[in-house]
Image: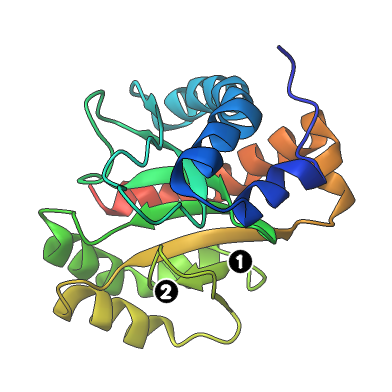
Amino acid sequence: MQFTGFIKNDFNTFHIGGLEERMEAIQQRIQPKFKVIGDILTDDLSAMIGSEMFLHIAKHARRTVNPPKDTWLAIAGNKRGYKQHPHFQVGLFDDHVFIWLAFIYELPNKTNIAKSLLKNIQTIKKTVPTDYVISLDHMKKESASMADVNLKDSLTRFRDVKKAEFLIGKHIDANDPILQDGDRFIEFVKETFETLVPIYRLAY
């Protein structure tokens, strides 16, 4: 299978009522695409980072009632899981695609990672363009641009608040033509990840 892009129907998946019905649509419409682009991106990230990276596709296994509002693939340096490790994500809400380097609350060494990021705050500002966006909660759609966010405050909160998170990357609107061009989209994600790899290294 070749990845030809994301279409309106993929985003409409999140308007389907019922857990089973929505999960079935995610599995049929979106996960095969995640597998194709995920394999390409995992190889690329392994080369960029210099160690083997592993693809994980969200299963939403813990859900018993509420259907997922978004879905994603994650790429991490651990074969068994990704939530307890810094990881890269590509995923969809009903109105946009997100491309993240994600540090989420399950990280066992979250405090040390936050300290390292705070210590290297100037490097982050120099490395990451101002049109990149930051989120402090992977469950929410909202994000703020690097130009508008107080990076020090965000990272301090990430360090001090148990459930706080730090995600940095890009959003692409569901109507952006780049999403209908599979090759162009994959190139865009690769370039985004390439920009974020130095930040990933700071966590280690």
Residue occupying image coordinates x 84% and y 55%: 176
- Residue placed under numbered mark 1 in the picture: 132
- 15 relative to 52, above or below: below
Residue occupying image coordinates x 37% and y 73%: 121
Question: Residue 175's x, y, as percent?
Answer: 84, 57
Question: In the displayed structure, does residue 156 sit left or right of residue 112?
Answer: right
Q: Which mark is residue 26?
A: none
- 39 relative to 154, above or below: above
Question: In the displayed structure, does residue 182 sit left or right of residue 87?
Answer: right
Question: Residue 201's x, y, as percent?
Answer: 33, 47
Label 1: which secondary element: loop
Q: Amino acid at mark 1?
A: Tyr
Given this view, does label 1 or label 2 mark the residue nearer the observer?
1
The image quarter in which residue 76 lies: top left
Q: Nearer the viewer, residue 198 or 193?
A: 193
- Residue placed under numbered mark 2 in the picture: 122
Q: Amino acid at mark 2?
A: Gln
Who comes first in sequence, dot 1 or dot 2?
A: 2
Q: Nearer the viewer, residue 196 or 57?
A: 57
Question: In the displayed structure, does residue 6 sit left or right of residue 141?
Answer: right
Q: Nearer the viewer, residue 19 or 173?
A: 19
Question: Residue 39's x, y, as percent?
Answer: 53, 20
Question: Residue 37's x, y, as percent?
Answer: 61, 26
Residue occupying image coordinates x 72% and y 35%: 187
